[in-house]
Amino acid sequence: MFSEYKPTNKKLFQITDNDGSVINKKYMPDLSDKEILKAYKDMLFARTADLQIVSFQRQGRIYTYPPNYGQEAISAAMGSIMTEDDWLVPAFREMGAWLAKGVTLKEIFLYFMGHEDGSRFENAKNMLPISVPIASQLTHAAGIGYELKYNKKKNVVFAVVGDGGTSEGDFHEGLNFAGVWNVPVVFVVQNNQYGISTPFKVQTASDGIAIKSLAYGIKGIQVDGNDYFAMYQALKNAKAHALKGNGPVLIEAVTYRKGAHTTSDDPSKYRTKEEEASWDLKDPLKRMKAFLLNKKLFTEKEEQKLIKEYKSEIDRQFEAVEKEMNYPLDDIFKYMYDEMPADLLQQKKEYERYLHRQAN
Ligand SMILES: Cc1ncc(C[n+]2csc(CCOP(=O)(O)OP(=O)(O)O)c2C)c(N)n1
């Protein structure tokens, strides 16, 4: 697979088209109807939760949030391939993969409400915290890969980063180290076409991201990131490759961030309606739903029922978190320094005034 789709061949790895028809039978994964349905439901749940969280933020009930809208197939496929013992080294825009690892909705809500308990991930074995310093997680991923190899463990690391992250020095350091030491790390770049407002065409002068694998002496592949089956197959092969001791793989998952960068961003300032409409045709959920409807594995009615159930479950859990959200103000400030510097002290005072105003 990696030789057929080597980046210099300039062939995007796809299995289904925009209508959900299988166009690449050779690589169609051998999944049961039940497994396919589960993957779709996982995507639907993640999308429903994502849209709800944006709405909570608009109601002033949560702080800033980075929507996953449009990128769900990548996380769902990672969720299908990762085992409990595999490592997940996240960025910040792959909620479906966090949920698959065992992160709870409660933790996700707490995290985006600024509560440190949201980083505990009590039930998620072998997962690092969410990483906002762009690409810094890739050096950690390479280090974990080194440990797995050193101790001859039979698991791999899945590390996630965005296209903007590939312009950071840490991307180079992580991939260079991983290549030199031949460690079992699968690097997944979610190329969602933007780094905030920076379009991909000015992110790099290279012909895509997958081709950068050549410079590190590792395998690379460009995959349709909105095609669950293609992502599943690419990740499965990458994991098998790494487990055989053949080293890291760089997967460029080509996708589109349908939402804003975060809830503080307005993408209408830097992209057109026409562009958004063209990507809408490639929406990962629409494609997989078309596949399921064609095979009569699912109905529109079932979908509506599920969304309703998911929404009330998400609401219920969110309201429960809101009720018990109560932490001492000092928790936000006290762990960084032994003696708080003047600017932090000033911030704390301002926040105290803000809380006081809110309470009165
Ligand atoms: C080291 C660092 N520089 C800058 C930022 C500010 N920042 C947050 S997200 C972002 C863009 C990231 O783009 P990309 O890697 O493509 O991921 P995406 O947001 O598209 O998922 C930037 C520049 C940061 N968090 N960390």
Image (cartoon, rainbow, N blue to C red):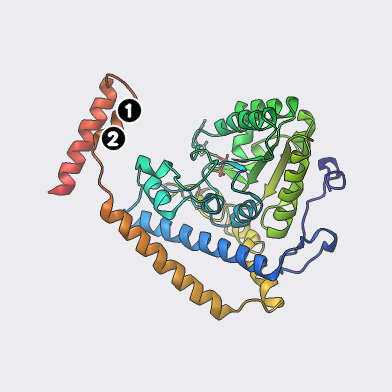
| Marker count (numbered) | 2
From the image, tell me which residue sits under label 2.
331
In the rendered view, does 117 fall on the left or right side of 352? right
- In the depicted structure, whether residue 16 falls above or below residue 181: below
Residues packed near mark 2 inside 10 Å, few (<14), some (14 to 19) or many (20 plus): few
Q: At 55% across and 53% down in the image, what residue appears?
A: 100
Residue 2 appears anywhere in the view: yes
The residue tagged with tag 1: helix, strand or loop? loop
Q: Position of residue 39 (x, y in %)?
A: 62, 62
In the rendered view, does 291 fall on the left or right side of 338? right
Name the image quarter holding residue 238.
top right
Residues packed near mark 1 inside 10 Å, few (<14), some (14 to 19) or many (20 plus): few
Q: At 60% across and 58% down in the image, what residue appears?
A: 276
Q: Nearer the viewer, residue 222 or 316?
A: 316
Q: Nearer the viewer, residue 140 or 161?
A: 140
Name the image quarter holding residue 85.
top right
Q: CA distance from mark 1 to mark 2?
A: 7 Å
The residue tagged with tag 2: helix, strand or loop? helix
Residue type marked 1: Tyr
Name the image quarter holding residue 115.
top left
Q: Are marks 1 and 2 in contact (CB under 8 Å)?
A: yes
